[in-house]
Image (cartoon, rainbow, N blue to C red):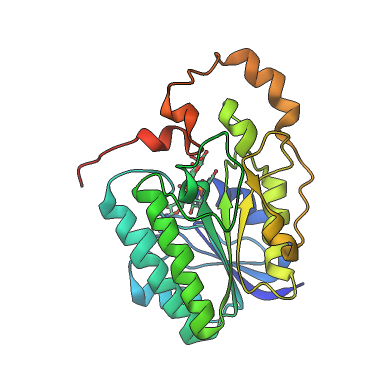
Amino acid sequence: KAHEKLLLTGAAGGLGQALRERLKANCATLRLSDRVSLGDAGSQEEIMLADLADAAAVDAMVQGVDAIVHLGGVSVEGPFGPILQANILGLYNLYEAARKHGVKRVVFASSNHVTGFYRQSETINADAPARPDGMYGLSKAFGEDLSRFYFDRYGIETACVRIGSSFPEPKDRRMLATWLSFDDLHRLITACLTTPVLGHSIVFGMSDNAVTWWDNSRARHIGYVARDSSDIFRDAVYARTSAPDLTDPAVQFQGGGFVKAGPFAD
Ligand code: NAI
Ligand code: 15L
């Protein structure tokens, strides 16, 4: 196994549940964390609940692990207060704990909403400047910059995986471009955890979809090869959805509906 003890945060969430079994292949022991219940520890598992905003709890959560898959946090656009606590303060707490305890590598669940205000008619790569589409996207852009600082200053390697839409199936026409299957997500995380030299890297998390807005040529060193594709769902998605309104910002921009969410009261 590549890792002795791997920490998975956000383990109670949609992607955490999908990865709970899959990641056992990557490590001797999988430490699961969330702020909500994770049930009983199964074989190969340890459970340590923590709120990401609680520095002492995060410190204890990180102690003793050799790598982290960080999925925990607010995962959609909404009021700034919870985003500040989980995604901004939480990221600082996580990297401070990683620095203190000598953790060498992190896979950070960033998001396509870091670049949500590029158009659906553009193909961008990891060098394109961030164009966040809301408070949530801004918090993920902060996480990308924070992790770059911890690499430049302390040598902690991070893969910022700008996940597109990782669900069992694409739910709408936009997700035909952004879809990432759970098996490809696991393949991508495995590649990030095992590539010899990761440095600080940004990679778009997508399956091998024919229609795409993202070019992963800046991340070839990670060695991720997608095996799934949204294309097998195309006809069914078209059949159950209506033709897009090209004047709708949710259709014009890569971030979809997120670009017109809010403003929210805190
Ligand atoms: P989710 O919302 O289902 O899971 C997030 C988990 O984080 C939840 O179990 C929640 O309890 C936990 N959490 C929230 N605030 C917390 C806090 N203050 N302290 C500790 N735990 C906290 O989200 P999902 O879909 O599983 O996504 C996982 C990660 O991947 C998130 O960081 C999300 O932003 C990112 N992502 C997911 C995408 C997707 O398509 N599913 C797309 C892009 C990014
Ligand atoms: C995200 O960042 C969200 O976490 C997820 O729930 C989806 O909305 C996804 O982006 C998307 O853009 O489809």
User: Residue 84: percent from the left, percent from the top?
Assistant: 31, 59
The image quadrant that residue 200 belongs to is bottom right
Whether residue 69 sits left or right of residue 116 in the image: it is right
Q: Is residue 77 left or right of residue 69?
A: left
Any part of residue 168 in sight: no
Residue 41, percent from left and from top: 57, 62
Give the camera-side residue of 34 and 265. 265
Residue sitting at x 61%, y 78%: 66
Between 18 and 149, the residue placed more toward the observer is 149
Q: Is residue 199 found left or right of 71 in the rendered image?
A: right
Q: Position of residue 216 (x, y in %)?
A: 68, 53
Task: Tell me which residue sits at (35%, 77%) in the image.
Answer: 56
Looking at the image, which is closer to me, 124 or 100?
124
Quadrant of the image containing the N terminus: bottom right
Residue 101 placement (x, y as % from top left): 50, 85
> How many marks are shown on the rendered structure?
0
Q: Quadrant of residue 247?
A: top left
* Location of residue 55 by image quarter: bottom left
Q: Could you tell me if residue 165 is visible in this image?
A: yes
Q: Residue at x 32, y 43 (%)?
A: 78
Which is more toward the observer, 117 or 81? 117
Whether 73 is drawn above or below 55: the answer is: above
Q: Is residue 180 above or below residue 103?
A: above
